[in-house]
């Protein structure tokens, strides 16, 4: 069985074309982009005949089984809901939506349509996350006691909707791994803002904070997690980190990009507790035709590099893992990970964390997305 896949948005979205082209259960059927010149450039480069410059026309095509949405953030919710109502399965890049109400609406549309929804959260398919997940499942971490994650970058010079964005409005890369490792559901959140960004940036979203740091309490668990984000006016090399503390072993992310993470092992002599580790690749979990995309560049079928699409193992080698999970979930008629309710929970943590920061750290409870 092969699914007809349509990719919407061809900036970042084009990274996924050759992965779908090689997946044994996918047919890279159609692409959609408002800019017709760009649409044709990509279509010609990858040999894709079906091309749409109008999203509604794409959704009206009865041969499309699933859409993978890579459009700008403000379009995610509307396009996801439209696709689900049109009877298409949906994969969407992060975040799911920009409001808790829209997250709820997507969960409802998923249930009403009977289709699958997956938020394409890269971090929970990165080799670092898969490495820690394997340690946890083998019992090597022991009892997990605490989780922590950060996402710091300098967004100066980014286009459109990015300038002045509240840090926690793009928090899924640090919320996803702390919730996802033990499949926990965030119950409530408290967040503090710290520092101030330049006035011309702050006034765009009425969001003054340079850093937002949040504590998440998980439902039906003794665990909480700590996550922090910065986007402007903070000196820091790009860092997307994820750390887990167990009673047997703990995993800590490296401070500088080119260094190695550290495993701490309990009850050893103090100097021997920390040990630098090399995180392996997890391509062996994938069908052979797409294994190469965890570490190699993105090329077209005859191995010619074209345009500027090189992946370089970006996002921790996660792209083929996400594609495989989405396609497999549809073929096997099961929920993908993360499913709609999990995606809504992770996204809403960030949205409500920002509201908490504006209220001086007020505790805010998350809605129950699992019983919509």
Image: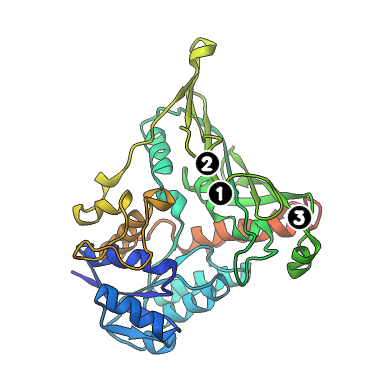
**Residue marked by disc 3:** 209
**Residue marked by disc 2:** 242
Residue 148: where, in percent of width, then height?
58, 40
Q: Is residue 302 above or below residue 285?
A: below
For marks 3 and 1, the one nearer the N-term is: 1
**Badge 3: residue crowd in 10 Å (few <14, some 14–19, many ≥20):** many
Q: Is residue 202 above or below residue 78?
A: above
Side (left or right) of 156 relative to 4 = right
Secondary structure type for disc 1: helix
Residue 53: where, in percent of width, then height?
41, 86
Q: Is residue 370 visible?
A: no
Marks 2 and 3 sit apart, C-alpha to C-alpha, by 22 Å
Marks 1 and 2 in Cβ contact (< 8 Å): yes
Q: At x 28% / y 46%, what residue is drawn?
A: 283
Residue 286: where, in percent of width, then height?
25, 51
**Residue marked by disc 1:** 174
């Amino acid at each position: 069985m092969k699914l007809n896949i349509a990719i919407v948005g061809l900036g970042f979205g084009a990274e996924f074309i050759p992965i779908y082209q090689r997946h044994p259960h996918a047919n890279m059927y159609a692409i959609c982009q408002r800019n017709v010149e760009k649409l044709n450039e990509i279509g010609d480069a990858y040999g894709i005949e079906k091309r749409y410059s109008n999203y509604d026309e794409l959704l009206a095509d009865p041969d499309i089984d699933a859409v993978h949405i890579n459009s700008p953030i403000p379009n995610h919710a509307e396009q996801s809901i439209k696709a689900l109502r049109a009877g298409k399965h949906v994969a969407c890049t992060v975040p799911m939506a920009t409001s808790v109400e829209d997250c709820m609406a997507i969960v409802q549309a998923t249930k009403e349509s009977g289709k699958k929804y997956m938020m394409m959260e890269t971090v929970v398919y990165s080799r670092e996350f898969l490495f820690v997940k394997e340690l946890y499942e083998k019992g090597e971490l022991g009892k997990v006691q605490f989780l922590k994650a950060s996402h710091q970058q300098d967004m100066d010079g980014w286009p459109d909707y990015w300038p002045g964005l509240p840090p926690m409005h793009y928090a899924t890369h640090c919320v996803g791994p702390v919730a996802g490792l033990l499949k926990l559901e965030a119950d409530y959140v408290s967040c503090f803002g710290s520092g101030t960004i330049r006035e011309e940036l702050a006034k765009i979203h009425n969001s003054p904070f340079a850093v937002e740091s949040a504590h998440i309490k998980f439902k039906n668990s003794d665990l909480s997690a700590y996550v922090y984000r910065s986007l402007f006016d903070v000196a820091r090399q790009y860092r997307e980190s994820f750390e887990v503390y167990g009673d047997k072993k703990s995993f800590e992310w490296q401070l500088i990009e080119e260094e190695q993470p550290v495993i701490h092992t309990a009850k050893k002599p103090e100097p021997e507790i920390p040990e630098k580790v090399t995180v392996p690749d997890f391509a062996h979990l994938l069908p052979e035709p797409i294994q190469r995309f965890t570490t190699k560049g993105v090329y077209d079928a005859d191995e010619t590099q074209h345009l500027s699409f090189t992946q370089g193992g970006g996002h921790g080698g996660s792209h083929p893992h996400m594609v495989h999970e989405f396609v497999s979930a549809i073929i096997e008629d099961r929920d993908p990970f993360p499913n709609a309710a999990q995606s809504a929970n992770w996204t809403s943590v960030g949205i409500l964390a920002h509201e908490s920061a504006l209220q001086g750290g007020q505790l805010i409870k998350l809605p129950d997305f699992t019983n919509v």
